[in-house]
Amino acid sequence: MRILALITARGGSKRLPGKNVRLLGGKPLIVWSIDIAKDIPEICDIIVSTDDSTIAEVSINAGASVPWLRPDELATDSSSSVDVALHTLDWYEGEKGPVDALLLLQPTSPFRRRNSILRGIKLYMDKLKPVIGMSPAQSHPMWCYQLDGEVMRPFIEYDPINTPTQPNAYVINGSFYLIAPEVLRKKRSFKSNDMVPLIIEELEERIDIDTEWDWKLAETFLNSQELKK
């Protein structure tokens, strides 16, 4: 099994400028994702796709490959992770041969555990279907409402008498995407009707850093770990 690990890290970030190289717990944010992917036998290479020379330098120093800077057309606010992944796949397979799967690790999920990656890889090898990291929803959709004019209406209509128990609700947490290259090329999406959930229960693994508040939450978690030592 040859799995190519891809970490996408654009230089521009309007809500949290410079987040990918900002120090979290003493090391740049992106390095958390690079480090966790090392020494996993199934991972044949770790590539960082970035348009930023500083991110590239930090990533190379951390042991990742940065064979090029991302083209301008793939470094805009509207650029999709699928287009970036396909650009990387086409280059890598053209230069170094085919891979069995692409593993997308977003740098905004610094606290994913090695065991979660190993579980996800095993799920993929057993099912041979796209695997996506998911966590229990913090707010169940049956308790959510939507605004209809000036009236609040249930987001999901249900009969509490005939629906005594709520089905479990899960959300994509952004920490893990694993898919076969041919499936990604065909569907142009990491999601599919037959995707397999990698259920992640740990609260810290769900942290997805996109705002200053998220960053403070990550620091709070690290500080709490220090207090336990």
Image: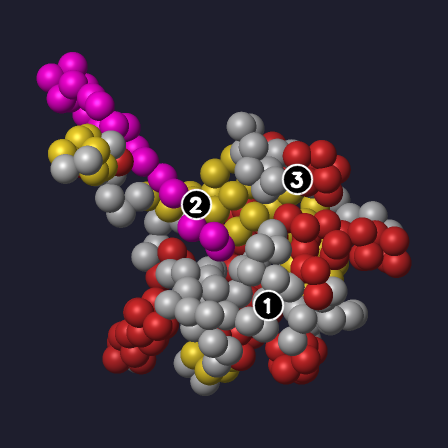
Q: Residue at x 47, y 52 (%)?
A: 174
Sooner in the amino-acid sequence: mark 3 or mark 2: 2
- Pointer 1: what residue? 10
Q: Is residue 166 left or right of residue 222?
A: left
Q: Nearer the viewer, residue 148 or 187?
A: 148
Sooner in the amino-acid sequence: mark 1 or mark 3: 1
Q: Is residue 89 left or right of residue 210?
A: right
Between the residue at mark 1 and the residue at mark 3, the CA separation in whole angstroms equals 20 Å
| Disc 3 versus disc 2: nearer the observer | 3
Which amino acid lies under the numbered mark 2 shown in the image of this protein?
A: Ile
Residue 119 coordinates in the image, percent (x, y): 52, 47
> Is disc 1 in contact with disc 3, using a CB cutoff of under 8 Å?
no
Which amino acid lies under the numbered mark 1 shown in the image of this protein?
A: Arg
Q: Residue furthest toward the top?
A: 162
Q: Residue furthest toward the left?
A: 161
Q: Which residues are magenta?
A: 156-175
Q: Is residue 123 visible?
A: no
Confirm whether the magenta stretch covers residue 169: yes
Residue 155 coordinates in the image, percent (x, y): 24, 32
